[in-house]
Amino acid sequence: MVEKSFLIQSAVNIAEEISASAIIIMSNDLPLEIDTHIPVMLASTSAMMAADHLLEASNVEEGKDSTGRLQAISETLYYKGTLGSERISDASVIAFIANMLAADHVVGIVSHGETTSIVVHDLKANPVVKELRACSERVNLNILKSVLMIAMDLGAYGREGKPVGTAFIIGDMEEVMKRSHQLVLNPFFGHPKEELNIRDPAKWETVKEFAQLDGIFVMDSHGYIHAAGRYLDVNAREVEMVKGLGGRHASAAAITRDTEAIAVTTSESDGIVRVYRDGIQIIEIDPRASKVSRYK
């Protein structure tokens, strides 16, 4: 058996050779004594462990002949390799949104059971990152990242243990305000402009508190919040939606069809974060399955 420490050192060598932004480790049992100047991050393994359990239960069955068992093992190994690549891709998206990556290449180490793989991921080819960068033609990318950080935190943890659903409409503010009205008194009205900047992490707790209000947030393309608790007056009947999503998602999608705004929603039922542009869902992120923290 190949020593896992050898595989880790191989991953470190690759990361240093290509000047990677980070090494992302997805494992519960890898040694973490890693000597490198490359930032090292840890990613959640919960989603992968659940998928592994389902795969092994369905594929590796007693009673199969030798050919069948060999095929099942081959499919399992292929699936684990593909799953590892997908999970590193997902973790890279979270790290990108959190501004933890300075360049486009990430080296991942994925270990579960007796299988350990090394993944080199290029953010330029990541479909979520590509869509986020395309949105920067309309809104500042760092503003969108800040909104996504808040939305993902609400999706993963809710507020005081309770699930929270909300929506953020970013950009083309004047047109969005024309197509909406207040459901409740606007908690952001009359405050100094410097107190309304979504890019300031010190303001995020306030935003998450007001996310419990009915209605949506409206902010301009520079990241200043103009309103919360607002209702969108749009016709969402012809918007194509994922089945099971409610009126908040439909109206958020519709306002991006009728204006140049970008919409970010958090689902109260499952915590999924979605991004809409031109009336179409372009991004879906499960914040509970993809968590990344800095190790060193």
Image (cartoon, rainbow, N blue to C red):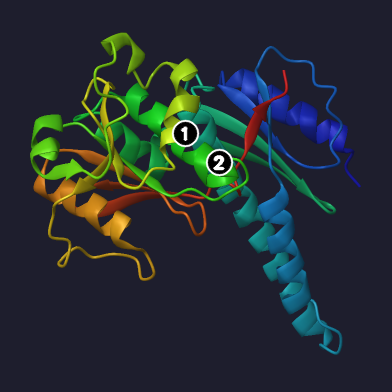
Q: Which of 282 and 246 is in front in this view?
A: 246
The three-letter code of the residue at mark 2 reads Arg
Q: Is residue 123 visible?
A: no
Please say if the residues under marks 2 and 1 sit with CB atoms less than 8 Å apart.
Answer: yes
- Left or right side of 215 for 161: right
- Left or right side of 285 for 117: right
What residue appears at the point 68 percent right and 12 percent down from the top-left corner? 37
- Left or right side of 202 for 186: left
What residue appears at the point 89 percent right and 38 percent down from the top-left corner? 3
Q: Which of 214 and 79 is in front in this view?
A: 214
| Residue with the mark numbered 1 | 208
Q: Is residue 66 above or below residue 174?
A: below
Q: Which of 256 and 59 is in front in this view?
A: 256
Residue 283's x, y, as percent? 37, 48
The residue sitting at the front extreme is 185
> Residue 36 falls in which quadrant of the image?
top right
Q: Earlier in the sequence, mark 2 or mark 1?
A: 2
Q: Is mark 1 on a helix, strand or loop?
A: helix
Residue 260's x, y, as percent? 13, 38
Q: Is mark 2 on a helix, strand or loop?
A: loop
Q: How crowded is mark 2: few (under 14 residues within 10 Å), some or many (20 or more)?
A: some
Q: Is residue 213 above or below residue 268?
A: above
| Residue with the mark numbered 2 | 159
Q: How many labels does the image show?
A: 2
Quarter of the image that includes the C terminus: top right
Q: Distance between the residues labelled 2 and 1?
A: 7 Å
The three-letter code of the residue at mark 1 reads Lys
